[in-house]
Amino acid sequence: MSIIYKDYWRKSGLKGKWGEIYLSRLEKYQPKHVLEIGVFCGVTAMNTCDYLQKKHKGDFSYTGIDLFGSNKKYLNDEIEPKFLKDQKFSNPLKNLYYNYIMRENLNSLESVEKFLKRYKNNIKLIAGDTNTVLDTINIKDIDFIFLDGGHSYKTVMNDLNMLWSSKGKSKVLLCDDYGKMSYIPEVEKAINNFVRKNNLNLNIIENRFAEIII
């Protein structure tokens, strides 16, 4: 199966080979129900849905959780990826189109919903902080999770514990920003403590992603 990660003219935390590596993990495990924590501008969401559509012919689900732009509540201990703080595009055509013609915040819920509209029957987007909304959704059928939301120790640990405590099928948990290629100390500390506490195996991929089976 040909796997190509597309940028769709939007910002993404996964550039170049990192998107291809992400898709290779989907191909390895071939999930049907994916949860992404940290949707950003929806690029990884679209690539995920494109993959699931090709693999499962419409029989799949995607759930995405994010603060979504104007809904953000900036917390003193939270860490936000730099590329989400503004919409300054290096490509002048993108800058002109989104900031001056469309006047569109690509990280808003409305923008991401519009971007993913071809999959509207398969997706569910949730605006909120995972510290308060993750325990309100049914994740027992989820079999693959990409964790790239809040990056404080508290938030990462909360997300991990909530996912661990959910009843249901075995899940692949792929965490970004663990290794030195996109290192965030709080993320590494939370994952290490979680794995140690629950006696789980940790697979480090390309010195960036931490992969855990929970």
Image: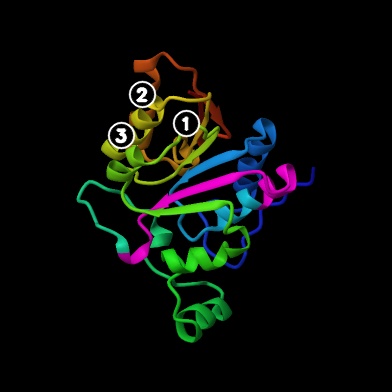
Magenta run includes residue 63: yes
Q: Report if residue 145 is visible in the image.
A: yes
Q: Secondary structure at mark 1?
A: loop
Answer above or below: position of 166 versus 114: above
Camera-side mark, 3 or 2? 3
Q: Secondary structure at mark 2?
A: helix
Crowd tier of the residue under label 3, counting other residues whose Cα lies within 10 Å: few below 14, some 14–19, many 20 or above: many
Residue that mark 2 sits on = 194
Q: In the orientation shown, which residue stands out farthest toward the top?
A: 199
Q: Report if residue 185 is visible in the image.
A: no
Distance CA(mark 3)–CA(mark 2): 10 Å
Number of numbered discs on residues: 3
Q: In the orientation shown, which residue stands out farthest toward the bottom?
A: 101
Range of residues picked out in magenta: 50-70
Crowd tier of the residue under label 2, counting other residues whose Cα lies within 10 Å: few below 14, some 14–19, many 20 or above: some
Measuring from the top left, give residue 72's x and y in whole percent.
29, 59
Measuring from the top left, give residue 212's x and y in whole percent.
50, 26
Indicate the amino acid at tag 1: Lys
Camera-side mark, 3 or 1? 1
Q: Earlier in the sequence, mark 3 or mark 1?
A: 1
Q: Earlier in the sequence, mark 2 or mark 1?
A: 1
Residue that mark 3 sits on = 158
Q: Quadrant of the N terminus?
A: top right
Distance CA(mark 3)–CA(mark 1): 17 Å
Whether residues under marks 3 and 1 lie with C-beta atoms below 8 angstroms apart, the answer is no
Measuring from the top left, give residue 105's x and y in whole percent.
43, 71
Q: Tell me which residue sits at (34%, 37%) in the image.
A: 156
Residue that mark 1 sits on = 140
Answer above or below: position of 178 versus 200: below
Left or right, 108 with reference to 206: left
